[in-house]
Image (spheres, helix red, strand yellow):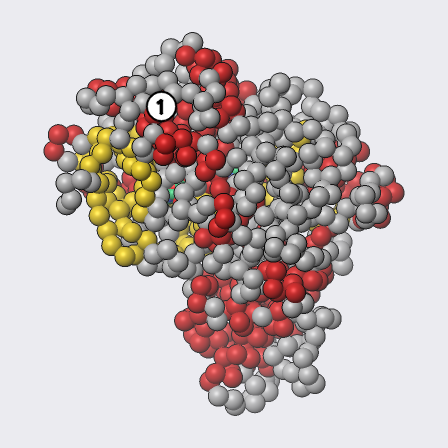
Amino acid sequence: MDSDEQVKVSTLEAYADTILPGEKRFPGDHAIAGAAEGPGAVVAGALELLHTDATGVTVGLPYLAQSLNEHAKGYAKEHDLALDESLPPFVALSFADRTALVRSLTAPGHPEKDGWVSLALFCNMSFDSAAHKHTAEAIAEGHPGLLAMGYTAPDEDGLWRFPKFSYRRELARLHPDTTPSGSPA
Amino acid sequence: MNAYDKTDVVIVGSGFGGSIPAYHLAAGGAKVTVLERGPWLETKDFEHDYLLGSSYTRAFDFVVGDGMSVLGGNCVGGGSVVYFAAMPRAPKFVFERHGSIGRRMWPSAITRDSLEPWYDRVSESLPVSKQDWNDVSYAGGLWASFCDHSGRTANPAPVAVDNDRCVNCNFMMAGCRFDAKRSLLTNYLPAALAHGAKIRPLHEVQRIERIDGGDYRVHFNVVDDEDYRLQSGSGTIDAKIVIIAAGAGATPVILQRSEAALGTMPHGVGRYFSGNGERLNTAIINEERVREVLGLSREDGKVYEANHIGKGPTVANWDKLDGSLPEYERYSLEQLYFPPGLGTILAQVPDGAGSDKDVPRWFGVEKKEILKKWASWLTIFLMTEDDNEGVFGTPPPTGNAYRISQQMLGRGPLKYDPTPNTRHGWALADAECKEILEKDGLAKVAPWTNDVVGAYTVHPLASCRIGDDPETSALHPNHELRDHPGIFVTDSASVPGALTVNPAMTIAALAERSVPGIVRALQARGVDVTYGAPAPDGSITGRRAVSKLSLVSGT
Ligand SMILES: Cc1cc2nc3c(=O)[nH]c(=O)nc-3n(C[C@H](O)[C@H](O)[C@H](O)COP(=O)(O)OP(=O)(O)OC[C@H]3O[C@@H](n4cnc5c(N)ncnc54)[C@H](O)[C@@H]3O)c2cc1C
């Protein structure tokens, strides 16, 4: 088995990849399951974001990774799965099993739900808002999440402006009980 | 204690509930100090950036509770700095609601008609204007077109936005870099400062005690500018009158924590919380069907693909704001934009987009697929009638939440377990959304999930509400805390229940209405103060309207 740090990193990568999956970075990539085409949360910077102090979750990461592996062991036992012992237990699970486990950890009523939801929240944010980078820089660098979502570059001063923003047509009848202030009666 | 830390009025929080009395009382001659837990950001500080630590996370606050999460402002100007500035007046029937108490929940002195002159004052002060179809964003136009296609009406929402300055960047939640949004930083607050009011940012009020002679002592901590979990000191300030306006998610917590020193709080403090009956529905638009069926296209040849272009909500459907319908069956459906991050995590994969019940809806492979269509999302914001079922538990050691992140994210003591009435309203509104959006294959829609962070509101209300009945309200109809003379609550916490529309206009009108009574309370304590200032820019049309009224508000 790898060093503690490597175990932590690949376990968290596997979690991030379960939230927003991507393609493997290299043949034999275990942390990323390869369940979806194109880069996912890991390549979008999930680990960088999780290690940003501002999130407030950074100090808890070793504990979360360890706990996730404990849960994975329990899950494997319960489902009679033999795990590759050269990998951290959560990484050794298939994508479908990782997904099922994360679903149960984040389900209403699970005592640790809050922690696993926060972790998912930040993994998601690495992809959909690149919260560890200035947005304009992330786009200029080709951030995979922001580009996948159709974000375009800002003006030269780093601000977005959309001179064209409206169909500029009357598109519906107004409610008959609209007051002169434009409010409902 | 420093002998100088003494003033006539301390105001806790600088949103609508705090800034409006701050201006009027300062203009009338009172010494006013506003304590605000968040930073004081200016136009140049407002960034277009999702980086943690940019104005987006500095200025707002997301508190996860048990069954309900609350999003609010955290800066000088409060929610007005991050809000979307849709400013409708509440429909007439709202004021006649019974809600969870089985009889009219608003004080008998307040109706839509009696509030109208106060709405006018706010409308003139911010100012608020009607929009026309030229102002409506692509997303709003699309929603209008959907409504029309299914035989419904749709209205451009009245807004507090200077549309000539607006660049439609859709970064409203990070504060307005172009000064187009009429936040309180552009009207009441500068006017209050001009009349000598003091604003102390990064001052988080913890509790209040009563001192000799009937005055109050307000205890605060000084919060670090970057890491809000850290405190760099504490202090007190004495005042004859305290106005609490920390927002409906924070005001009752300050009072609960003060109970040991002040004595028993009215039953209504920290109870009857309403999330304004809110939910989001996210539709994934079929661009080609929209071209074929609705005949829409943009100037650049695209059909819609414009989720990120515009300015929050611009068009609402008000067909179900019909007073003849039973309670819990009335709601509005408003087009809305939420930026990524908080706005996308909970969007669910709709039925029939290849999903079955064994795949997760809010994360995973299919979630990634709908994220790739993000530019073609249309978000509909449902504001229904809920049952005021939120209750605040034991207050955390400081503020109103255990802070998790340096900024933005915390865990709070609010507990919310929706009743069948509330769920009924949500289900009707969800079904109507689906009917409108999925007609003729125009879109696929998935309703909100409460399973991840609970219900979610940007419009917290009623945790310390006004009313005639001491059993079910915390405040007299003049906003004074029952059994605690000299403490007033003038913010969203005072609004008795869900409004079925965006609330800031009503919160602001109530705050305007509360001022004459507060002036009288100050006069009774020997402070030389008068009432009657014009709108912050000097306009006096609104003042004429209210000066015709008896300025006795509910006493
Ligand atoms: C993203 C978003 C969009 C919105 N869009 C709209 C819209 O389009 N239309 C609409 O009508 N409404 C909108 N709202 C809601 C609106 O902003 C609120 O209803 C309104 O601001 C509430 O006013 P308030 O005075 O009660 O509280 P707030 O404006 O929240 O002000 C309370 C202030 O008190 C401060 N505070 C809290 N605790 C303490 C303490 N212990 N000590 C000192 N200060 C404290 C807070 O930092 C805050 O600045 C939106 C809200 C959000 C978050």
Residue A113 x, y percent position in the rendering? 48, 61
Residue at the extreme right: B292
Relative to B433, is B277 on the left or the right? left
Which residue is drawn at the image coordinates 14% and 40% (left, top)? B3
Vertical placement of B208 versus A115: above or below? above
Which residue occupies the foreground of this view, B417 or B169?
B169
Which residue is drawn at the image coordinates 41% and 12% (left, top)? B547
Q: Assess disc 1: are there few (<14), some (14-19) or many (≥20) residues with their C-alpha within 10 Å of its C-alpha.
A: many
Relative to A104, is B206 on the left or the right? left
Q: Is mark 1 within 8 Å of ligand 1?
A: no
Which residue occupies the foreground of this view, B169 or B391?
B169
Which residue is drawn at the image coordinates 43% and 31% (left, top)? B188
Tell me the quadrant of ligand 1.
Answer: top left
Asked whether the viewer can see residue B535, the reply is yes
- Picture quarter containing residue A126? bottom right
Which residue is drawn at the image coordinates 54% and 83% (left, top)? A88
- Picture quarter containing residue B437? top right
Residue B115 x, y percent position in the rendering? 47, 19
Vertical placement of B262 versus A158: above or below? above
Chain under numbered label 1: B
Residue B505 x, y percent position in the rendering? 50, 29
Q: Secondary structure at mark 1?
A: helix
Query: For mark 1, what is the residue?
Result: B515
Which residue type carries mark 1?
Val
Asked whether the viewer can see residue B62, the reply is no
Relative to A32, is B248 on the left or the right? left
- Which corner quadrant holds the C terminus of chain A? top right
